[in-house]
Image: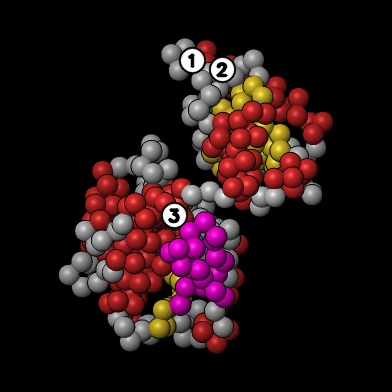
Amino acid sequence: MEFILNKIKEYNKILIFGHVRPDGDCIGSQYGLARIIKETYPEKEVIVTGEASDYVSFIGSPKMANDEDFKDALGICVDIANGDRVSDQRYKNCEYTIKIDHHINVDSFCDYEYVDENSPACAQIITEFFIKFKDELKMTAKAAEALYVGIITDTGRFKFDSVKRETFNAAGLLLDYGVDLGYIDNKLSVETLESLKLRGYCLTHFETTKAGFAYLKMPREIIDEFGVTNEEAANQVTAISTVKGCPVWALFIEYPDDIRIRLRSRGPVINKLAEKWGGGGHAKASGASLGSWDKLPLFLDDIDEIVNDYKNNNPDD
Ligand SMILES: [Mn+2]
């Protein structure tokens, strides 16, 4: 981390990169880090570049930097596991690049990389970076808010197994800088009317298998009928996450070229199955591809096998 601080000191121009389809942790990490650097070194030019996200636009909305911004610049990539997922591929034009991330380290694409796979959020790593050099760095309320949002969105509001004591330490420190919990909760919880109505549809139309797999088919007509974005449609996977006896659940979302599966679990490991079905991901949150509706029975057979195995080994769950 000392090395990263020295690189920040060395450069007058710093660009901060995120990943494609950014989430709260990505945008929170980008703006949290940018604001700490700007507050500490006001003379430096700090640019947040890449894609924006509607969901967390209250933190900030990155715009694409200009080509000349990359000259003699330091580039810091946050919350990105793979080089091809950097939403502004011109990161390669920076003079020096650093990666700060918490995903499994599969791809090396920066000159220097700091990866903590045990951290539940990249924003936690950035908060720890601040804590380590607290005497030197300056935090602002807006920086703290961004980092706090990063931590809570990547931990499901402190619900996931990945949460550790350090997570609360980091969140607690950010509260000291004036994070407004009610404001953030409102911003993250309010849904559009269309999206809420779609949730009602999901709750009344999902199906279950005998083994205990809850799923919902979301054909294109439904997405269009409710007038929601693909992102809003995909977020409905949480609608069927608490069905007793169904430790695995999924949405099947029809896109013009594919039917994508958003697969979730609170017990069995599902990423091996997701890999078999042209996808992958984490042990309990994966994505895959169904291809066409006629393959659904085959997929249900596969998933039922996993659920049955799990239930045989965990009769109390
Ligand atoms: Mn993350």
Could you tell me which residue is drawn at 53 percent across and 18 percent down?
245
Instruction: Mark 2 and ligand 1: say if the CB distance to the nearest ligand atom is below 8 Å.
Output: no
- Which residue is under mark 1? 313
The quarter of the rendered structure image containing the C terminus is top left
Say what amino acid the circle numbered 1 marks.
Asn
- Which residue is under mark 3? 187
Q: Is 55 inside the magenta-drawn segment?
A: yes
Q: Which residues are magenta?
A: 47-64
Say what amino acid the circle numbered 3 marks.
Lys
- The number of discs equals 3
Element assignment for label 1:
helix
Q: Main secondary structure of the magenta part?
A: loop
In percent of width and height, residue 110 lies at: 48, 67
Is label 2 in contact with label 1 (beta carbons under 8 Å)?
yes
Above or below: residue 116 compared with residue 41:
above
- How is the protein colored in the picture? secondary structure
- Which residue is under mark 2? 309
In percent of width and height, residue 27 lies at: 46, 62
Could you tell me which residue is drawn at 48 percent across and 59 percent down?
56
Could you tell me which residue is drawn at 43 percent across and 64 percent down?
59
Which mark's residue is nearer the viewer, 1 or 3?
3
> Disc 1 versus disc 3: distance between alpha carbons?
41 Å
Q: Residue furthest front?
A: 193
> Disc 3 versus disc 2: distance between alpha carbons?
40 Å
Could you tell me which residue is drawn at 31 percent across and 57 percent down?
180
Task: Please name whichever residue, 193 or 8, is drawn nearer the observer in this view of the structure.
Answer: 193
The disc, 1 or 3, on the residue closer to the chain's N-terminal end is 3
Residue 124 appearing in the image: no
> Disc 2 versus disc 1: distance between alpha carbons?
6 Å
The quarter of the rendered structure image containing the N terminus is bottom left
Above or below: residue 310 compared with residue 128:
above
Say what amino acid the circle numbered 2 marks.
Asp
